Image: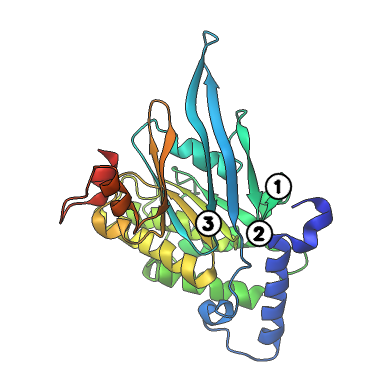
Amino acid sequence: CSPSQVSSCPRARTQEAMAAVRLSTESGSDTDSIDSILSMDGFPNTCLTFKDLAFTAKLPKGESKTVLEPCSGHFESGELVAIMGPSGCGKTTLLDMLAMKKTGTYSGQVCVNGHKRHPVLFPRIAAYVGQEDQMPAHWKVREALEFNSALKCPPGDAGISRKVTASLIHNLLEVFGLTGVADTYIGGEKVRGISGGQRRRVTLARGVAAQAPLLFCDEPTSGLSSTDASLCVKALRGIAKKMNVLILVVIHQPRREIVELFDKLVLLTSSPGRMAYFGSMAGAPLYMESCGHPVPCNSNPADVYLD
């Protein structure tokens, strides 16, 4: 988007959609579930396209090291995308470039709905969930979600959208399995609070609470048990489908049940990082078989892909 195209950018259209929701709220329609509100259109369609994205790091001795070779692709709204590959293949580098979080100089182009990504407008429609959970220990779970939602609330809409925001927070607590600890402290070294798995789910819910049609997650399942990891990815899939959010997830060797939850796979190789596969997750086994690497029955496809 460019400043002259604000009315056509996804964030602006999102605000228009929320305005329509407010009108229905004021007229007395049911606002008990955000699912019923967003089921009409969800967030506006927000597609992400990248072309020839590449990154080369400068070493202390003046040498250059290619971290990620040029790669291209396209993601549609409502997709849950897995970015996989061995350590050092450039998974986080690719995610950071797509999310406009990479501080180093890189090459390539990223477009939103066919328009070149704008440095001012893009952060308004994108949310990023990093590997570290940075939250005050004395925050309560509900307060953490309300804080992120308030940060992204358009100017002048705080009072009008209070009912919509409250309904959104309520449903996020249910989707991420946090209703029982909604009024519990986040906790820390000196404050007793929620568990590590619940803490990670709070971080993901905060990203969704920002009400952005683009969500980038950097290894949200790292350090979690298989059960907690499954709960996180299932919640993300539900958000992607119900709210039409494009979610990109860097994930390392998930179990079979988690692999099947993703719509699309971006598979990278290392030394240097380059794209080995880009397509549907369901079509990956057939592609591997055509390359002479069939996936054995009853095995985890993720293990085969990484091997």
Q: Which residue: 44% across, 43% down?
A: 131
Left or right, residue 292 beside residue 11: left
Name the amino acid, label 3: Gly
Q: CA distance from mark 1 to mark 3?
A: 24 Å
Callout 2 amino acid: Lys
* Residue 29 found in image quarter: bottom right
Pick whichever of labels 1 and 3 is earlier in the sequence: 1
Which residue occupies the foreground of this view, 172 or 118?
118
User: Residue 207: which numbered mark, if any?
Assistant: 3
Instruction: Tell me whether circle 2 and circle 1 mark residues in contact (CB < 8 Å).
Output: no
Which secondary structure, mark 2?
loop
Toward the viewer: 133 or 293?
293
Q: Residues within 10 Å of mark 1 (few under 14, many from 20)?
A: some
Q: Earlier in the sequence, mark 3 or mark 2?
A: 2
Q: Residue at x 24, y 42 (%)?
A: 292
The label on residue 116 is 1
Q: Secondary structure at mark 1?
A: strand
